[in-house]
Image: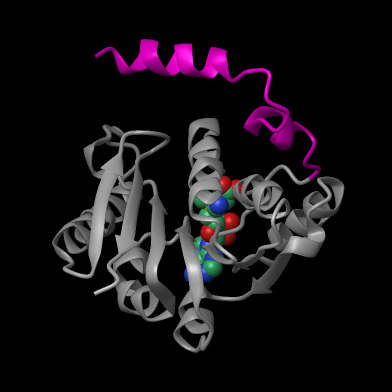
Amino acid sequence: MDFKKASAYIERLYEKRKLTKKQYIETTELKEFGTVVDDDVARMLQVLITLVRPRKILEIGTSVGFSTVSMAKVIKQYGGKIVTVEIDRDVARQAVKNFEREGVKEQIEVRIGDARAIISSMNEEFDLIFQDVGDKKLYGEMLEDYIRVLKPGGVLLAEDTLFPVFDFGSDFSDLTQMCEALDIFNKKIADCPQFESTLLPIGDGLTVAVKRIC
Ligand SMILES: C[S@@+](CC[C@H](N)C(=O)[O-])C[C@H]1O[C@@H](n2cnc3c(N)ncnc32)[C@H](O)[C@@H]1O
């Protein structure tokens, strides 16, 4: 299959949707922030949330909140809640402004700080976790904590997991470390007996893993 052609065709089918990445970024005042998910990943998040109906979602890596808003628009329909974690205070402030603008502020709680510290001391449980944090070492390092706070039958989603097969060129040497960290995570999740999982070739790679009930 020609993935470029397929992807262009799919985007044409969905181009009339209201909340696109392009519009979202254009209406965000802050211009310096971590990249946000592609439209196909935002749609997949919405489809999975419609299917699973999670009451409580944990997102790691808010940036200006495109993925958060995409998820919140769905959970607003049935009354769920999102806890989203962001280390950068300025970016988090912009995300909150965007949540107000998009009418989903009530559905979202932003926790500012290092996800390592915040999640390792968490005592709550979640129905769905979306991992999209800039520091890719966290993916593998935090896996035990994600398992601890994820309910049986809950879903773990992780973005950028196809980085290890991307050709970034020699100018991006820091990306080598990211790719190594993601490869470690990918192998861990594929071999983890607690999850039924796969890796979808959308966005920059989206891992979908369901925590087994027993
Ligand atoms: C790829 S962006 C998230 C994009 C967002 N999920 C979206 O699609 O709209 C990654 C974010 O992770 C944040 N980040 C990096 N290291 C972090 C850490 N240790 N704890 C919490 N957030 C972190 C960065 O500041 C950045 O805003």
Q: Is residue 97 visible?
A: yes
In the depicted structure, whether residue 114 falls above or below residue 204: below
Q: Quadrant of the N terminus?
A: top left
Q: Residue at x 52, y 35 (%)?
A: 38
Q: Horizontally, is 19 left or right of 138 in the view? A: right
The color scheme shown is one colour
Residue lying at the far left of the rendered structure:
191
Q: Residue at x 54, y 36 (%)?
A: 43
Region in magenta:
1-29
Q: Quadrant of residue 139?
A: bottom left
Residue 106 occupies quadrant: bottom right
Q: Is residue 176 left or right of residue 132?
A: left
Closer to the camera in the image, 122 or 13: 13
Relative to 19, say whether 181 is above or below.
below
Q: Looking at the picture, how far across and down is residue 201, in whole percent?
A: 32, 34
Between 162 and 171, the residue placed more toward the observer is: 162
Give the residue at x 37% y 79%. Answer: 145
Count of numbered circles on the image: 0
Magenta-colored stretch includes residue 50:
no
**Quadrant, the C terminus:** bottom left
Q: Is residue 4 magenta?
A: yes
* Residue 47 locus on image (x, y percent): 51, 41
Q: Residue at x 61, y 58 (%)?
A: 62
| Along the viewing direction, whichever of 60 and 198 lies nearer the viewer | 198
**Where ligand 1 lies, by image quadrant?**
bottom right
Q: Is residue 111 above or below residue 183?
A: below
Using the rendered image of the protein, determine whether residue 35 is visible from the camera's viewpoint: no
Residue 81: x %, y % from top left? 66, 66
Where is residue 52? Give x, y as percent. Answer: 49, 54
